[in-house]
C-alpha cells in the first residue's frame, strides 16, 4: 500500500511550501488508494512554538487535506509526535553504536566552536574532525558515566554513497565529504536525520517527498538505511518554489504564510489548483481544474524539477476566475463567511443583491468591502471635492424624488434627462453623482447600485451635499 507523509515542524505559522508538499503527498496517496500521514517533528525545542501544531492542523483543514493518521487522529504507528518517541530513537541510536556504525562523542561546545572557527579560517568546510571516533571501548564506558555525550554517525572512509532520486539521475556523494552528523543529542532528543529515517521506516512510508534543499544532505539518510538494513522508500525531491525575480520563496516574506492567503480572501481550492502547477503540468495544458481531476491525473514521477515561479498576480487572476464561474449563492456565502471571521456582520439579503454587480469585478473575497461598503453605510469621505456643486445636487435630488417606480430603467432615463439639463458633459455629471452616492470614482454600475440602495437612501445622500 502507498503510504505518504507530511512531516511538519511546529515552528510558527504554516508555510505555503508545507502545503505544497502535503498536497502532492495527499494527492498521490488518494490516487493510489493509499494513506496520508501527518507527523509533527517537534525535536527542535528552541524553535518549537506553543500553538503552532494547532495552526498546522487548522491550515490542513482549510485546504481539506484530511489525514488518515496523525497525533490528533491516532493510528497503528502512534505516537506521531516526535517528542513522544524519544525512547524509540535512543534504541536505534544504541543499535548503531553496537554495530560500529555510530559512536559516542564527548566534545564540549567550546572545543567544537574552536575547531569550526579554525577550519573556517583555513578555508575548509567546518565538519567534525572525528576527535572521538576511535576512542577505546573501555574509555568510552568510563566517560559515559561521568560526562555529557552525543552519538554521532560513523561515516565510512573513501566510499561512494549513491542517492537514487526518482526525478533525477543518480547522485553520487564521496563519503569523505559527508559530516559525521550528531544523531542523538545530549538531552536525549534525536536530530532530523535519525528521527526521519526511524519514523519513515517504522510507519511504513513508501514514498518520501521533500524539497530539493535536502538533496545535499541525503547521503546521511542513505547511510542510515543501509546501516540499519532497512528497505529505502522511493525518494522524490521537489523543486524549490521561487518568486518571479527567481529569488527563493522565503519565510521572511509575508505571503509565504497560509494565514496571509486566508486574510486576503483567496479560496483554498484555488491555492491548491495553483500549487498543482508548481512542477506539474496538466496533460491537456489546462490551468484550471478541480482537485478531483488533479488527484486522478497526478503522478509523482511527472514532477518537473525546473524551479517553478510563484506569481501572485497569476494566483489572483485564477482566484477571480473561480469566483466568476461560481454560483451567485456560493459567492454570497463565501463573502459572508469570510467577513464573519473578521467580526464584520452583513445584511445577507443585501449582500445577495450586490453579487451580480461585483462578481465579475473582484479577484479576492477581501475586495468586496472596499468596493461595496457604500451599500451598508453612507460614504464618510469623497474622492472628489463636491463642495461647489450644491445647486447641481439640489436639482438631482428633486429629479430623483419624481421617480415613482424605482427601477434601473427609470433611474437611468431620469438621470440622462437631468444630465442633459445640467449642461455638464455626461462623463462629468455621472462622475459627480457616482462619488456622491458611493464616495468613489470607480464603483459597481451606478444605476443598479442606486436601485439596490433605494430611493429614500439615494435622495438622502444627494440632499446632504446641498447644505
Image: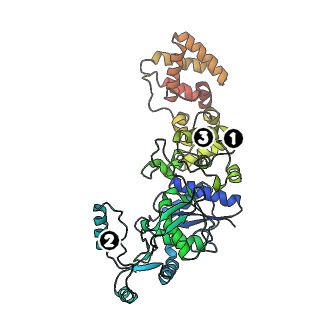
Circle 1 SS class: loop
Residue topped by disc 3 = 318
Q: Is residue 41 visible?
A: no
Horizontal and vertical percent for residue 231? 61, 72
If the image is split into quadrants, where does the N terminus sit?
A: bottom right
Residue neighbourhood size for the residue with mark 3, other residues' Cα within 10 Å, grouped as few (<14), some (14–19), many (≥20) = many
Circle 3 SS class: helix
Residue topped by disc 1 = 327
Determine whether, in the image, residue 186 is placed left or right of residue 406.
left
Horizontal and vertical percent for residue 359? 62, 35
Q: Nearer the viewer, mark 2 or mark 3?
A: 2
Horizontal and vertical percent for residue 305? 56, 51
Point out which mark residue 112 bears: 2
Q: Give the quarter of the image for residue 443.
A: top right
Distance in Å between CA atoms under marks 2 and 1 = 63 Å
Residue reaching furthest to the front: 158
Residue at x 35%, y 81% (from the top left corner): 148
If the image is split into quadrants, where does the C terminus sit?
A: top left
Q: Nearer the viewer, mark 2 or mark 1?
A: 2
Amino acid at each position: 500500500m502507498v503510504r505518504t507523509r507530511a512531516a511538519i515542524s511546529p515552528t510558527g505559522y504554516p508555510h505555503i511550501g508545507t502545503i505544497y508538499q502535503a498536497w502532492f503527498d495527499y494527492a498521490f496517496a488518494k490516487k493510489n488508494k493509499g494513506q496520508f500521514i501527518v507527523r509533527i517533528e517537534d525535536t527542535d525545542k528552541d524553535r518549537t512554538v506553543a500553538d503552532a501544531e494547532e495552526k498546522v492542523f487548522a491550515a490542513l483543514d482549510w485546504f481539506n487535506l484530511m489525514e488518515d493518521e496523525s497525533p490528533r487522529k491516532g493510528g497503528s504507528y502512534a505516537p506521531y509526535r516526535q517528542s513522544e518517541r524519544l525512547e524509540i530513537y535512543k534504541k536505534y541510536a544504541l543499535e548503531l553504536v553496537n554495530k560500529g556504525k555510530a559512536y559516542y562523542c564527548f566534545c564540549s561546545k567550546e572545543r567544537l566552536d574552536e575547531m569550526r572557527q579554525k577550519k573556517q579560517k583555513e578555508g575548509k568546510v567546518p565538519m567534525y574532525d572525528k576527535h572521538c571516533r576511535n576512542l577505546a571501548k573501555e574509555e568510552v564506558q568510563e566517560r559515559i558515566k561521568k560526562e555529557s555525550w552525543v552519538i554521532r554517525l560513523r561515516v565510512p572512509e573513501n566510499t561512494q554513497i549513491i542517492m537514487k532520486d526518482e526525478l533525477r539521475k543518480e547522485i553520487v556523494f564521496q563519503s569523505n565529504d559527508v559530516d559525521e552528523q550528531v544523531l542523538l543529542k545530549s538531552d536525549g532528543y534525536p536530530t532530523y536525520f535519525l528521527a526521519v529515517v526511524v519514523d519513515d521506516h517504522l510507519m511504513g512510508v513508501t514514498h518520501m517527498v521533500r524539497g530539493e534543499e535536502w538533496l545535499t544532505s541525503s547521503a546521511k539518510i542513505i547511510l542510515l538505511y543501509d546501516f540499519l538494513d532497512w528497505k529505502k522508500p522511493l525518494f522524490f525531491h521537489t523543486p524549490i518554489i521561487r518568486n518571479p525575480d527567481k529569488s527563493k520563496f522565503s519565510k521572511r516574506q509575508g505571503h509565504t504564510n497560509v494565514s496571509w492567503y486566508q486574510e486576503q480572501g483567496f479560496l483554498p481550492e484555488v491555492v491548491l489548483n495553483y500549487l498543482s502547477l508548481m512542477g506539474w503540468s496538466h496533460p491537456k495544458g489546462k490551468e484550471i481544474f478541480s482537485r478531483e481531476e488533479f488527484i486522478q491525473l497526478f503522478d509523482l514521477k511527472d514532477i518537473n524539477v525546473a524551479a517553478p515561479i510563484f506569481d501572485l498576480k497569476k494566483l489572483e487572476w485564477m482566484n477571480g476566475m473561480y469566483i466568476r464561474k461560481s454560483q451567485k449563492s456560493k459567492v454570497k456565502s463565501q463573502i459572508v463567511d469570510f467577513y464573519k471571521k473578521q467580526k464584520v456582520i452583513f445584511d445577507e439579503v443585501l449582500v445577495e443583491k450586490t453579487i451580480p454587480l461585483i462578481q465579475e469585478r473582484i479577484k479576492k473575497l477581501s475586495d468586496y468591502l472596499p468596493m461595496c461598503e457604500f451599500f451598508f453605510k453612507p460614504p464618510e469621505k469623497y474622492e472628489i471635492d463636491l463642495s461647489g456643486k450644491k445647486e447641481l445636487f439640489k436639482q438631482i435630488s428633486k429629479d430623483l424624488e419624481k421617480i415613482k417606480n424605482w427601477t434601473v430603467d427609470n433611474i437611468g432615463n431620469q438621470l440622462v434627462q437631468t444630465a442633459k439639463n445640467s449642461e455638464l458633459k455626461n462623463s462629468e455629471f455621472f462622475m459627480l453623482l457616482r462619488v456622491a452616492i458611493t464616495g468613489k470614482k470607480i464603483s459597481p454600475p451606478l444605476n443598479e447600485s442606486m436601485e439596490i440602495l433605494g430611493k429614500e437612501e439615494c435622495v438622502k445622500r444627494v440632499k446632504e451635499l446641498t447644505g
